[in-house]
Image (tube, coloured by chain):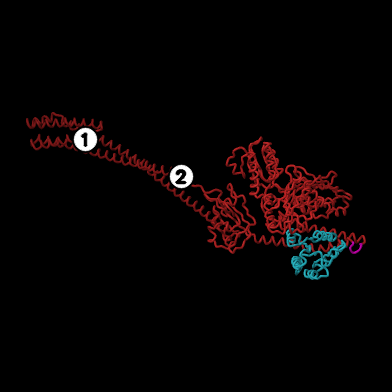
Amino acid sequence: MDDVLVFAASPPRKPRFVPFVAAGVLGPLALVVLALWFGGQARQVDGNRAIVRAAYEKRHAAAELLRELAEAEAAQDGFVITGNPMLVGRYEEARVKAAQDVAQLDELYVGHPEGSARIAGVRALIGVRFQGMTEVIRLRQQMGAQAAVARITAGRGLVQTDQARAAVSALVEAEEQAVGARVEFVRAHKEAAQNFVWTLVVLSGVVLLLGLWALWRGRIHRYRVERRAHREAARLRAIFASTTDAIMILDPRGRIEAVNAATTRMLGYAPADLLGRDASTLLDVADGEGSFHDRVGLADGRLIHPNWLDRTVRHRDGSSVPVDIALGLMPLPGELHIVAAIRDISERKALERMKNEFVATVSHELRTPLTSVVGSLGLLRAGSVGTLPAPAYRLVEIAENNSRRLIRLINDILDIEKIGSGRMHFERQPIDLVKTLERAIEDSRGLAEANGARIELAVPKGRTMVRGDEERLLQVVGNLLSNAIRFSPEDGCVRVVLTSNNGQAIVSVEDEGPGIPPEFHGRIFERFSQATGGGPRNGTGLGLAISREIIIAHDGRIWFGKAENGGARLSFALPLIQHAMARKSERPIRILLWQQQAGMAEALQAMLEQEGWAIDCVDTAEAVVEGAQSGRYHVLLVEHAWPDASRREMLRSLRQEVATRTLPMIILSPRESEGDAEGARGGGGRADAAATRDMVDWIATPIDAARLLEALRRAIDLSAAVRPTILHVDDDADMLEVAAAALADQGIVVHASSLASARALLVEQPPDVVVLDLNLRDGSGLDLLPELLRPDGTTIPTIIYSAEDVLPAVTRQVDAVLVKSRRSLPSLARTIRRVLASASVELETP
Amino acid sequence: MTTPIKILCVDDDPDIRTIAVMALGLDPGIQVHAASSGSAALVVLRGDDWRPDAVLLDVMMPGMDGLATLAAIRALGGYEDLPVIFMTARARKEDLDSYREQGATGVIVKPFDPLHLAEDVRALVESRR
């Protein structure tokens, strides 16, 4: 267990208070009860002592009484015999004391009815006896000794004395019995108390032992927990310290709280220089405005982008280190910290560079000798050094074909390598697939003729516009054609069919060959896979794999099937783009002409009107900028603007402004030099230049009408391709119509009058901005909000345009809220422009 | 069309030079001279007896490479607008873009098709006239 690093899944639990309170109350309560019990025992001992003392006093008093009785009898007898009056005094004294003893006994037996009754008997007997003795003494004094002796002899004095003695003895005996019983009781009680005390001692001992044991256990447990925590901390410290990735712990404000050794190595700072510093001053993450958590993309307790690839960190010496940064959450009590693991990728970058360089060099080194081989063979075969004899010709042909195959293989391997490393770039722009197919067929004609195959092409009328990299799509069609030709029988026909359906352009290439063997179906698009048996084996085995990658990169799909005649059919589909000419009725084509000399507009007017296009003519730079920003125009036609630097600068800025960069520009220049167009294209980064390259065209003057028309058509297509699509959802047909007219200059307006049709349109043609009414026939427009996403998952800018009140919570989810009325249409148009510009929608293909 | 197009072909590889000269020679309307290095090409251009209409220039050459040669040609005086067509086996998109940016009129990718070389060169030169 200790060998595995265990992370507690949950934080430690706080001890509960209640048991301690219960023990605190019950313990003292038990002690109080015990104290009360001991108090009771003490009182009982006192009672016993009082009882014993009382018994002693009673016996003492009884003995005194009997002694006084004997004293009195002796005094009486002495007086009778001697007549000494002193003895009468002694008698009297004994009589008084005896009375006192009886009174004392009486007192001692208060509350004891039985005892009191016995005392009453004793007192009566004593009284009678003393009465007899007093009588004898009176007779002796008055009548002499004779009479007294006679009285004693005749009397019952001795009997009375015995009776009195017996009564007192009985009293004493009873008392002794009572004391004996008491002693017996106390002895018995003492034993019980002793047992109880022993039990208590044993119990206390047990409790004490249990308490000590529990204390020990708690102490040991705490020790183990602390030891484990210490070991885990030591391990984590060791990992933290020894990992080669730099690790930073950032507090909720983005300041560095802890760093490991690798961080100091990577950044060149001492730890003390890093702690407390704002991480974004060093890392190429979380720049910009807002709180640190907002900047790193922390939402709902999780990081939206935990991995920041291909970033840089700043070294102390000012250099940049290329890194990948992985962010993780570190929830500490009350605060959310962030852990940044920073990996130095300089070496990987260098390796990548070396690999690219190596691939480029190898391809160069392979191609150079092949150039000589293919060139020589080609020239030989073409008869440039004289006609070859037929067998020699055949051999040269074989050599040339195989050299070409080697070239294809090198090219394909390079392509696959590019695809694998994600470096295949596509310059997508609006292209007419019909033309692409025609070019591809033209390129493959030689191969077809060599294989004795024909190629037929069937395309729909007009143009079929898709957004794509024409060279790469040519490569795909070329691959499909090459496969079809190679598998065609002699005099076979390869059919290329272009159709469009459901927003997709579909190209199919069919041959009359044996079809694709079923066992090959599963891996037809895999690299280096070629069908075995039957077919020719001079392909590279990479063509379909490359084609699939290219088509996928164009958001299309590629698949295979069986032609009606049993041959193979390979098809691909690409999404169609909107065709401006097809939408002519929705928005008349308007051209803005910036003329330098009068008369140009008139010259063009007639030609353009034939096409149904309108032309507006301006001659100041301000008017050009205003016109370009209005969004009304499809094309800007500039009459020879060079070499005036300020005009050139103005056109260049039009290319860079978000609002005007999508307006295609045609420059009419007397000198047939691309330099003019390059001038307008210039500025911005390289990516920018690539994106705008096709937005600028040039036409030599004097104008060739056919060339100008073609350039204009292409520009209008481009304009349509890059014009934003506005999806307006409203169930009021009048409003849709009025809004369409008001918004026509802002983009292509698409209508939906219900949630259902809006959903269908979202899939078919994702808009660039949505104008949303809330009160719809089949529900609330709010239901649509979560679905307003582009295919890449980002949110489509949305403007609520409704007569209903909108809650602030909803307002926060959308880009703007406007109250629906005809008067607010101009402000809706402005809002759409603002939303599109601020979203900085890249309308050109990246 | 009676005056032939004069092409100066520059490549350090004698095999390729031979093939290029022969391939261009397939077009009777093209007159070719060959040079084995950038400096040799400059010698030809400095002379007055044969002024080419275009230069077909290999990019990777020892010593003065194609780009350096191009810059030297532009600096010669009188050749600012001379079409210069690069020949290269380094045909990555970024390479091609950079050649165009540095002033190449066109690029012919090696291995070229000897049967179409003359046609391609003629098209590039004529588009510049």
Please identify which colour was used for chain A in the image: red
Q: Which residues are magenta?
A: A383-387
Please give the residue where the numbered disc 1 appears in the rendered image: A105
Residue at image position (74%, 44%) is A588
Residue A96 is inside the magenta segment? no
Q: How many circles with numbers are drawn on the protein?
A: 2
**Mark 1 Cα-neighbour bin, 10 Å: few <14, some 14–19, many ≥20:** many
Numbered badge on residue A627: none
For the question of whether residue A659 can be seen, the reply is yes
Magenta span dominant secondary structure: loop
Q: Looking at numbered disc 2 in the image, what kind of residue is underneath it?
A: Phe
Please give the residue where the numbered disc 2 appears in the rendered image: A17
The cyan chain is: B
Label 2: element kind: loop
| Residue placed most toward the observer, A589 or B66 | A589
Q: Nearer the viewer, mark 1 or mark 2?
A: 2
Q: Looking at numbered disc 1 in the image, what kind of residue is underneath it?
A: Leu
Residue at image position (93%, 61%) is A389
